[in-house]
Image: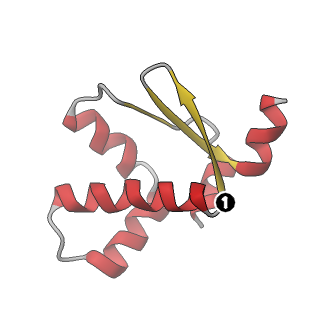
Amino acid sequence: AVVSWFMENSSFSLSADLKDKAYAEILNAVEPLNEIVEMYQALASPGDKLFFKEFLLWGLVEYNKLDKQETKGGYQFEDRVLGSFYNN
């Protein structure tokens, strides 16, 4: 479900200089991440839930399910197939 979300929403980036509210809004916009974290970490604090969501993204990158591109001041996450198509 998370990878499918990225296939449908090609523009997703996390900037290193985001304020807490903007960071939360961006991560919370990925509904499949919300569902996974609520399923396994429903009692976690809101800050910890954001950590788990970003951790899931990095895990998907490490297992070659998503691509990560370093941008000026942050990272862009995208579907592995479509991302490689657009970057070539």
35 shown above or below 68:
below
Q: Residues within 10 Å of mark 1 (few under 14, many from 20)?
A: some
Q: Residue at x 41, y 70 (%)?
A: 35
Q: Quadrant of residue 2?
A: bottom right
Q: Quadrant of the N terminus?
A: bottom right
Report x, y in % for residue 73: 42, 22
Judging from the image, what secondary structure is the residue with disc 1 in? loop
Q: Residue at x 21, y 61 (%)?
A: 48
Say what amino acid the circle numbered 1 marks: Lys
Report x, y in % for residue 14: 42, 35
Q: Residue at x 48, y 19 (%)?
A: 72
Q: Nearer the viewer, residue 54 or 70?
A: 70
Q: Residue at x 36, y 80 (%)?
A: 39
Q: Residue lying at the far front in this picture: please name it.
A: 62
Q: Quadrant of the C terminus?
A: top right
55 shown above or below 75:
below
Q: Quadrant of residue 49?
A: bottom left
Q: What kind of colouring is applied to the model shown?
A: secondary structure
Q: Residue lying at the far top in this picture: please name it.
A: 72
Mark 1 lies on residue: 65
Report x, y in % for residue 12: 53, 38
| Left or right: 44 in relation to 85 | left
Q: Nearer the viewer, residue 11 or 61?
A: 61
Report x, y in % for residue 40: 34, 80
| Left or right: 71 in relation to 6 | left
77 shown above or below 55:
above
